[in-house]
Amino acid sequence: DLDMMRRAFDEHDGDVAGVIVEPAMTNGGVIPPLPGYLEGVRALCTEKGAVLIMDEVKIGCRIAPGGATELWGVKGDIVTLAKAIGGGVPVGAFGGKRELMEQISPLGPAVHFGTYNANPLGMAAGLACLTKVMTDETYAEMTRLATRVADGMRHVIKETGTSAYVVQLETLGGIFFGLEEQPNNFREAARNDAARWDDYWFGMLNQGVIPMGSAWFEEWSMSAQHTDEDVDRTLEAFESTLRAIA
Ligand SMILES: Cc1ncc(COP(=O)(O)O)c(C=O)c1O
């Protein structure tokens, strides 16, 4: 809500050091940004002298090689990354404009120590993941498979007359039961039928498919390991689950 953000900036004029934004929300179901939203946040931060931090922990390296920054062309002053960039090994990273990064020791006053900083295993796994696994071909294949899943789910939803909305964001997606259109914020998303989502999730588990994270506010995502057979199996289980819970 850009108007609300501008009001918050005005109410705390000069006191706002920065704004942290998850460019596409993935902890309230999958909620892509409305057109113009990220550009508006960027412009406000620039106007007010606040640092814009793009939290790409969940979407960086997943929705595009350059994450949301590449997909929507809006640059933060700092970007945070984790999860997928480690290729299965726990890794976190952040980067940003030179003048900000130079604030960190040994160049600047801010200390950033940690037991696992630059951990050799994490760095080796991350490098291999980013340079050898996550190639352009891999992204294209993951997006193709994710599109198959999303289209297949929409087809089954229609066939079974289920009230549900499927969202796809490149290689990941989500499902909201009881909603017929894309929610644009958490409050709208929270109006979903969470009990029906539970039926879906356990129905899928009973058929040997873990369809996504373990709550309605999570997402499903394609990995470099998934194949057409996985998609077939998921869609078969989805169809029989929806028929069972309809
Ligand atoms: C969007 C988002 N940002 C940041 C984090 C924080 O990650 P961590 O707990 O590793 O600091 C999470 C955790 O899942 C997250 O979902």
Image: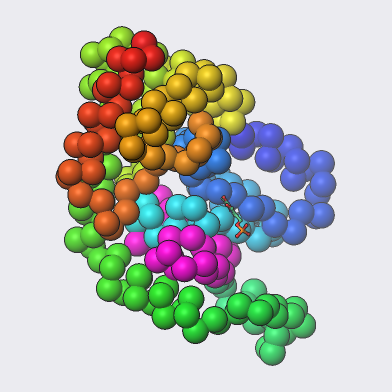
232 in relation to 196, above or below = below
Task: State the extent of the magenta-drawn residues as a range.
Answer: 65-94
Comparing 121 with 134, the one in front is 121
Residue 12 at x, y percent in the picture: 82, 47
241 in relation to 7, above or below = above
Q: Is residue 154 left or right of residue 54?
A: left
Q: Residue at x 35, y 70 (%)?
A: 129
Q: Is residue 204 left or right of residue 155?
A: right
Is any atom of residue 123 visible in this view? yes
Comparing 241 with 126, the one in front is 241
Farthest-out residue, bottom: 106
Q: How is the image coloured?
A: rainbow
Residue 223 at x, y percent in the picture: 32, 54
57 in relation to 94, above or below = above
Q: Residue at x 39, y 26 (%)?
A: 203
What quarter of the picture does the C terminus occupy? top left
Q: Residue at x 40, y 50 (%)?
A: 72
Quadrant field for ligand 1: bottom right
What quarter of the picture does the N terminus occupy? top right
